[in-house]
Each structure stands twice: as C-alpha cells, then as structure tokens.
Amino acid sequence: MIGWLKGEIQHRDQRRSRNLVLIGCGGIGYEVYLVQRDWQTLSTGKVHEFWIHQVVSADSLQLFGFLQVAERDLFRELIQVSGVGPQAGLSLLDACKPNELVRALVHSDIKTLCRAKGVGKRTAERLALELRTRLVDSDGSIDPDLNQVDSVPPDLIATLETLGYETHEIQSALQRLNSIGGPQDGDDDDAWLRACIRLMSG
C-alpha cells in the first residue's frame, strides 16, 4: 500500500469537479486527488510531499493525497461511515476547514455538514452519530491532533517560494507550526508568514 509520496508536480488538472495532480516519483507518474484548497496552492515543477490514502477496487486504483497526516487520518475516519465514499470525504473537507469539520461532527452541527456537495441530512446525522465519540478523548475534549489540523492561507506557499524557500522546507515548517498549536484561526496571513520564516531561519 502507498502511504506517502514525495515528488515533482508534473501536471495539474480538474476533471468533473475533481482536483488532480500528476506526481513524478522515480520515473513513475502517480495521479493523486486532492482537496481543492490544497490543489490551488500547488505549482507544477515544484517538489511536494503527500500523505496518501489508497483505494483499490475491482477495476481501478485511486490515490487521495493530503499535505498533513492528521488531515488524511480525518479523511479515513469519514469514509469509514456507511454511505460516505472517498469523493464525499473530499467534499466534506472542501466545504469546511478540517478543524471546523471536527467541531461540526463533535457538536452535531448538521447544517454545517450539509454544506458539503452530496451530503444530505441523513448522511450528516449518521456522520455526527458515529464520529463524535471517535474524535474526542476520554475527558470529552477534541483529539488535539485533529483539532490542530488547519488550512494555511492559500497564497502562503507561493509567497514563500518567491522568497527562495524550497517547497519541502515550507511543508515541514507548516507541519511543525500545527504541531505546536499556531498560528490559530483568526491570525492573519502575515502571522503565518512570519512564523514560517522564523522556523526556517532558526
């Protein structure tokens, strides 16, 4: 099973409202589906790392990629629920920031869950019912690894690349920022930029 890929983005494509990249690794090109906000931040010719969930069926093999391992793990929780396939899982992550989605699941916010394309009220209720206990610790608090998953400002990676930083450096810095709990929701783009530069310069 493929769990992680690192390679150069050879091509970006959108097919039937799906966001796809072709990643070149060791002379092989892998087609990987992404959430839209990640797809928008990536540039061809740049090296990126992805945490992968692989789906194998009788007639196909599909790869779904995430920039953060906790987001991939959240995706895996979503698709364990009956009636929620990989595309619905991506739709949920497209409709909400990951930490917003976790809060909606834990607090049974059906209206927020129904913002996802293809997710109706019954599916949203099933998601909340099955996942709200899986995503909290024994004391009732949200799993910190999932609560820290956040979406970076959409232009941050491109901005840092223009300043001369390598993509793998940027992704590593973003993962470290999330692991220490900052910046948080509400922080402006400059806060993310300054925090990343401090980490990469230290």
Image (tube, helix red, strand yellow):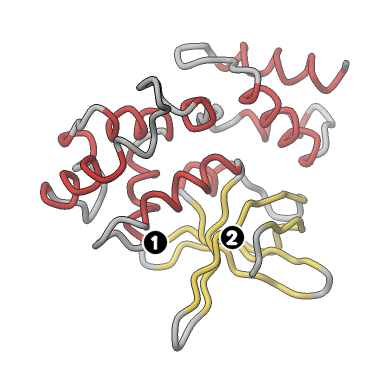
Specify the farthest residue to the bottom.
59
Q: CA distance from mark 2 to mark 1?
A: 20 Å
Nearer the observer, 131 or 202: 131
**Image position of 77 with respect to 2: above or below:** above
Q: Earlier in the sequence, mark 2 or mark 1?
A: 2
Residue at image position (59%, 17%) is 181
Secondary structure at badge 1 equals helix
Q: Position of residue 179 (x, y in %)?
A: 64, 25
Residue at image position (76%, 58%) is 7
Query: Residue 65: which disc?
Result: none
Q: Position of residue 8 (x, y in %)?
A: 76, 58
User: In the picture, residue 145 is in which quadrant?
Assistant: top right
Residue at image position (43%, 67%) is 15
> Which quadrant: the C terminus?
top right
Nearer the observer, 169 or 21: 169
Specify the farthest residue to the left.
121
Residue at image position (72%, 20%) is 196
Look at the numbered discs 2 and 1 and tell me whether their residues touch, using CB distance below 8 Å. no
Q: Is residue 132 left or right of residue 37?
A: left
Three-letter residue code for mark 1: Pro
Nearer the observer, 118 or 159: 118
Location of mark 2 (residue)? 12
User: In the picture, residue 10 is in which quadrant?
Assistant: bottom right
Three-letter residue code for mark 2: Arg
Q: Position of residue 47 (x, y in %)?
A: 77, 51
**Image position of 107 with respect to 180: above or below:** below
Location of mark 1 (residue)? 86
Q: Position of residue 43 (x, y in %)?
A: 66, 49
Q: Nearer the viewer, mark 2 or mark 1?
A: 1
**Image position of 148 with respect to 94: above or below:** above
